[in-house]
Amino acid sequence: MGVVVSIHRVQVKHGPAEKLAEARYITDFGLENDWRSRKGRGRQITLIEEEALEFVARTLKMDAIPEGASRRQIVVRGIRLNDTVGKKLRVGPLLIQVDELCDPCKNMEKTIGKGAWWAMESRGGIVGKVLEGGVLKAGDCVQIEDEPAQHRSAQVKQPVKSRKG
């Protein structure tokens, strides 16, 4: 099980990321007042591992990655996000469908520093869709959501053969 370390919002395209104590996520929309959030689209929510950012900092010989520089909304610790692709993830009160990896873009060279794009390869976090919204806070738990029992093991029922005799 992981934990939410920090939450960041960017209100305008190419604007600065602001750290939030809590954030409201809206079902099938995303983070309230974040320029990337839109109804009905994918990529409504982005997460990255704090451990990945620590790796990038070590690789680039930096003390730390500046907060919000990854351009991901949520920084988590203690869960391997790459393993959650295709699954549902409970992030505090939120339920998200993890759609795909969030590959780093060349902007990382500007927001973090030279070499960041390469260092973040396979460590850029994940993107998904908000299935259930709510107010998220630093310190909230992060875990893979179990599928309902009736969907865990679909059993195929064989027709009963009648006996003649």
Image (spheres, rainbow, N blue to C red):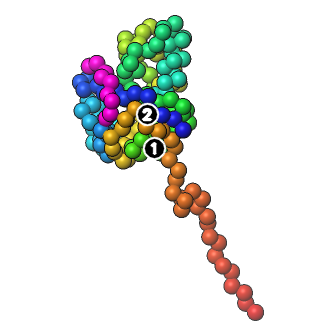
Q: CA distance from mark 2 to mark 1?
A: 13 Å
Q: Residue at x 47, y 42 (%)?
A: 89
As drawn, 82 above or below 161: above
Q: Of residues 82 and 146, which is closer to you in this image? A: 146
Left or right placement of residue 78 versus residue 138 in this view:
right
Residue at horizontal 34%, vertical 26%? 8
Mark number, residue 139: 2
Of pointers 2 and 1, the one earlier in the residue sequence:
1
Q: Amino acid at mark 1?
A: Arg
Q: Can residue 99 be seen in the rendering of this structure?
A: no
The stretch in magenta equals 14-23
When asked about the image quadrant of residue 4, the answer is top left
Residue beneath the point at 61% across and 66% down? 156
Magenta-colored stretch includes residue 149: no
On the rendered image, what quadrant is the N terminus found in?
top right
Which sits in the foreground, 58 or 45? 58
